[in-house]
């Protein structure tokens, strides 16, 4: 009997050991599964991306026919449809003015690096805009306002879809930062060459220069300060910023204002000065233009839209002050000279500006 009990005891110990082993293995597997659930599907998984205009992934944008796919805005008329005044062709929405195409290349600087952006441009749209009347009819007692003509040009519904193509391209370049979108837009417009149109208008018996529409500035790849400012105002407004224009009557110069903290704004207006004639730093209004001209008159503020404002910690504010201080020095030591060159590289600055 003694031998039998010993054998039974050994069997029981072995059986118990196997059960414990299976439990341990089971718990280990359970722990591993929980780890995968918690860390692979939770902590380490990035949230679903959104696009540069705020559209969630796998969703149609508010602007047809754009669709957000993996953070990229793409034409998808088959899913998102087309505006009523455009024609659906596959995944594209086309305008009757999209003819006589050519490739446009636009340069910009972001964080000290030079880039270029390509855009398909259409002579049909440019010709259509050239044929529009420059007049505005007012009722008795109404007075003409400069803002009326600006809004007439930047609110044209026919050019809107083609300008929107540029905006979406910019938003695709910086889908996670509306600030970088603004920086790209500002640099891009600043780098469009300055130049007048050859066209003239008879305005109530007076021959005046023709004022381009924003799309024509892109198509011609040149524009005056006011024309370029209206193009930039359109882009910044579409990105979502509160935008204005500053018009200097004595110098006949126009530039853009973008909503910003009061202490950085021009003359306490709440809008920061943004030059458009050539490359310049946001908030830098101490510029010297061609022939040594500076802006000395009190500008008119023309508010065009309400929206976002620039943040308080924008590095451009400090950089603009540093740049002005260094430029005003008669002599620069090696360190100051290096700082100046770094700022010029960072913002793609060059030479003086052309004042119309």
Image: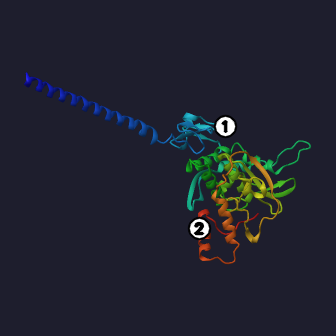
Q: Residues within 10 Å of mark 2 (few under 14, many from 20)?
A: few
Q: Nearer the viewer, mark 2 or mark 1?
A: 2
* Disc 1 target residue: 85
Name the outermost residue toward the right: 141
Left or right: 285 with respect to 146? Answer: left
The image quarter containing residue 50 is top right
Q: Quadrant of residue 6?
A: top left
Q: What element carries label 2?
A: helix
Give the residue drawn at x 63%, y 65%. 349
Q: Which residue is drawn at 59% across and 42% down?
A: 54
> Pointer 2 and pointer 1: residues touching (CB < 8 Å)?
no
Tell me how the rendering is colored: rainbow
Answer with the quarter of the image where residue 17 lies.
top left
Instruction: Tell me the number on the disc at residue 342.
Output: 2
Q: Is residue 297 left or right of residue 31?
A: right
Cα gap from disc 2 to disc 1, whole angstroms: 48 Å
Could you say where residue 269 lies in the image, as x and y percent from the top left? 78, 54
């Amino acid at each position: 009997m003694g031998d039998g009990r010993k054998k039974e005891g050994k069997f029981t110990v072995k059986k118990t050991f196997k059960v414990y082993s299976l439990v341990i293995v089971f718990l280990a597997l359970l722990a591993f599964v929980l780890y995968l659930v918690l860390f692979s599907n939770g902590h380490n998984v990035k949230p679903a991306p959104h696009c540069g205009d705020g559209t969630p992934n796998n969703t149609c944008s508010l602007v047809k026919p754009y669709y957000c796919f993996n953070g990229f805005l793409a034409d998808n008329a088959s899913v998102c449809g087309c505006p009523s005044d455009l024609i659906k062709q596959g995944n594209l929405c086309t305008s009757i003015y999209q003819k006589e195409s050519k490739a446009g290349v636009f340069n910009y600087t972001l964080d000290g690096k030079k880039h270029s952006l390509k855009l398909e441009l259409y002579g049909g749209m440019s010709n259509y805009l050239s044929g529009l009347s420059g007049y505005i009819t007012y009722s008795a007692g109404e007075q003409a306002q400069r803002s009326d003509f600006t809004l007439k040009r930047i609110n044209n519904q026919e050019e809107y879809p083609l300008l929107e193509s540029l905006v979406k391209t910019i938003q695709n370049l910086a889908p996670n930062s509306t600030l970088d979108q603004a920086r790209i837009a500002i640099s891009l417009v600043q780098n469009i060459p300055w130049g007048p149109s050859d066209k003239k208008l008879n305005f109530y018996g007076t021959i005046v220069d023709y004022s381009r529409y924003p799309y024509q500035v892109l198509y011609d790849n040149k524009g005056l300060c006011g024309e370029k400012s209206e193009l930039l105002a359109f882009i910044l407004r579409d990105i979502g910023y509160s935008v204005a224009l500053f018009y200097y009557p004595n110098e006949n110069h126009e530039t853009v204002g973008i909503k910003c903290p009061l202490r950085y704004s021009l003359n306490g207006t709440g809008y920061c000065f943004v030059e458009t004639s050539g490359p310049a730093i946001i908030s830098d209004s101490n510029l010297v233009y061609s022939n040594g001209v500076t802006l000395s008159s009190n500008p008119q503020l023309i508010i065009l839209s309400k929206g976002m404002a620039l943040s308080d910690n924008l590095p451009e504010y400090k950089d603009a002050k540093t740049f002005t201080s260094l430029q005003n020095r008669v002599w620069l030591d090696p360190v100051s000279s290096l700082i100046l060159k770094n700022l010029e590289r960072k913002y793609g600055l060059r030479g003086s500006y052309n004042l119309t």
